Amino acid sequence: MTLNHKLDFTISIPSHIYSSKNDQKPENIFSDSSAPFFSRLFMILRELPSYLSTARTLRFKGNDEGKNIFQQYQTVIKEFFHYRPSSQNFQKNIEKLDKDFSEKNNVIETNNKPICAYIVSSYDENGAILGDHLYYYHHYKINNFEKHYAVAAKVVRATSEMFQFLKQLKEKYPNREIKVIDVVAHGCPNTLCVKKQNGEFYKEPDVQKNEFQDCAKDATIILDACSAGQGSQNIGEKIAKMNPGKTIIAPGTSLFFSKPIFTDFDGKPSVQNVVHGFAIADAYTARKFKYLS
């Protein structure tokens, strides 16, 4: 799929949905098109140097422990393979992210870039969201987003916190749009593992109309959650349906190490695709969902 001045989706068309090239107004557009081959080819291996550089910088920030750079990289890699997740470790990393994100959120006032809201769920069970290697991963991803956007980030304990955070950003920066939202959480086809007020997870039937109304009308919402776009009646498509005009990007399979693919659209950045593992040689491309009405 290529992007010039017009967004050209590959479209699967149920009987009640029309192609964007049809004279009739389409109700729904969703794409299973692959990202450009080079962006998929050995994606994880090509991104590892950047990730490891971020991890080394954070791991030895303020204290090199008497180790040279080579030894520091060795330590980061060794600790990755010896890491054992625990609830205490998750809580420690939540506290570190809370502190880091609070400092980062003060910086977005210093530039005029459009806003990206980076949201991390406080729920984890295996280290795939809040483990030590994910602490580094969140910073690696934010570094990539910051090449194009001003990033405001938050660890959320409930969906109400997530939507309140978006509202606060809109109120604080009324002249700057929230163009991208990236939600990092556990998931499955009908569930995003961010808890509601009652302690249950946010499921496909829970999605309400215009919950992302504080974002730009054409915002891109990335669900970095395993299988959140898999099959039919998944939570990714439901969010798209309830938030017309916004593009939802969600994986159709299990997810490991995702990377947004950016493009410049008339001088403005946008997220073209998201590629992700577990595939090594040829990364998966996440699915896209967009309802126009």
Image (cartoon, rainbow, N blue to C red):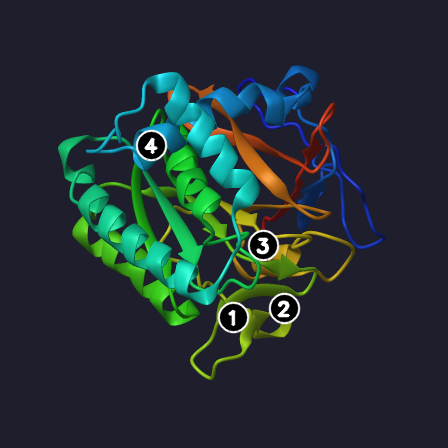
Work out whether mark 3 precedes mark 2 in sequence or the reverse, and give the earlier one: 2
The kind of secondary structure element at disc 2 is: helix
Task: Give, as a three-letter code, the residue at label 2.
Answer: Glu
Q: Nearer the viewer, residue 78 or 152?
A: 78
Numbered tag placed on residue 240 in the rendering = 3
Graded by Cα atoms within 10 Å as few (under 14), some (14 to 19) or many (20 or more), the crowding at tag 1 reads few
- Label 2, label 4: how many angstroms apart (C-alpha)? 29 Å
Q: Nearer the viewer, residue 66 or 280?
A: 66
Residue that carries the numbered disc 4 in the rendered image: 149
Q: Along the line of sight, which residue is nearer the eye, 289 or 261?
A: 261
Q: Where does the N terminus fall, quadrant-wise?
A: top right
Badge 3 density bin: few <14, some 14–19, many ≥20, Cα 10 Å: many
Q: Specify the amino acid type for callout 4.
A: Tyr
The numbered disc on residue 58 is none
Classify 10 Å Cα crowding around label 4: few (below 14), some (14-19), many (20 and above): many
Question: In front: 123, or 61?
Answer: 61
Name the residue located 67 percent from the left edge and 23 percent from the top edge: 40
Cα gap from disc 3 to disc 2, whole angstroms: 11 Å
Q: Residue at x 66, y 27 (%)?
A: 8
Task: State the residue at coordinates (42%, 80%).
Answer: 197
Q: Do the residues under discs 3 and 1 have CB atoms within 8 angstroms?
A: no
Quarter of the image where the C terminus is located: bottom right
Q: Earlier in the sequence, mark 3 or mark 1?
A: 1
Q: Can you tell which of label 2 and label 1 is closer to the viewer?
A: 2
Question: Residue 208 bears which disc, if any?
Answer: 1
Left or right of 12? Residue 161 is left
- Determine if residue 2 is in view: yes
In terms of sequence position, does the residue under pointer 3 or pointer 4 come before the other? 4
**According to the image, label 2 marks what residue?**
204
Is 254 located above or below residue 80 in the figure?
below
